[in-house]
Amino acid sequence: MIAIFNPTGLAPTPRPAPAPVPVPPPGPVGPVLELPGTPPAALVPVTHEGRPLGAFVLSGGRVRYRRVVDPDQLVAAAAGAFAVAALTAAVAVAARRRPPTIGTVRMGPGGWVSLRGARTPALRPDRRPWWARLLRARRLVVER
């Protein structure tokens, strides 16, 4: 024991500080919260790494789990759905492009021109109903 001398006499030795009480880390289940109301109800929050996941609701002798909506997860899901829709639309537009009407143009031996892939022009106006033109339907009997 070491005594410290000062002009007024011996100084009291300092007491050691009490050891801190270890506080358990917060668990995944929070404290039970009593809810006011006619049927008594209780709420037990559930967390994971500090983020709320949901809560157990105890009321009327039943226990139900209610999930909390995570806004970050909701935004990520919406962005993913938009990206998939945009990619699908781009693929559909790219696949719908038609090749040119006239394929290869070649000169024949006598100077005539060969247009491969060209359709013959219509001789008279198309008198089919709109749904037949949409379906590209043709009559089974020969038109005169």
Image (cartoon, helix red, strand yellow):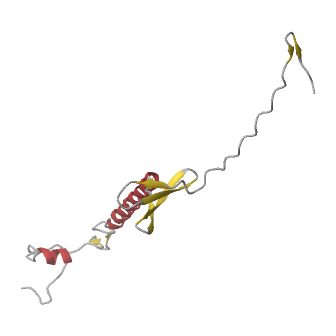
Say which residue appears at 93% left-offset and 27% top-offset. Answer: 1
Q: Is residue 109 left or right of residue 54?
A: left
**Total of numbered circles in the picture?**
0
Residue occupying the far bottom of the picture:
141
Say which residue appears at 86% left-offset and 9% top-offset. Answer: 7
The front one of 128 and 102 is 128
The front one of 19 and 117 is 19
The front one of 115 and 26 is 26
Quarter of the image for residue 130 reads bottom left
Q: Position of residue 41 (x, y in %)?
A: 42, 60
Q: Position of residue 89 (x, y in %)?
A: 35, 62
Quarter of the image for residue 85 reads bottom left
Residue occupying the far front of the picture:
9
Quadrant of the frame with the C terminus:
bottom left
Q: Is residue 120 left or right of residue 106?
A: left
Say which residue appears at 32% left-offset and 69% top-offset. Answer: 103
Q: Is residue 23 left or right of residue 14?
A: left
Q: Position of residue 98 (x, y in %)?
A: 31, 67
Q: Where 42 sits versus 121, above or below?
A: above
Q: Is residue 135 left or right of residue 62?
A: left
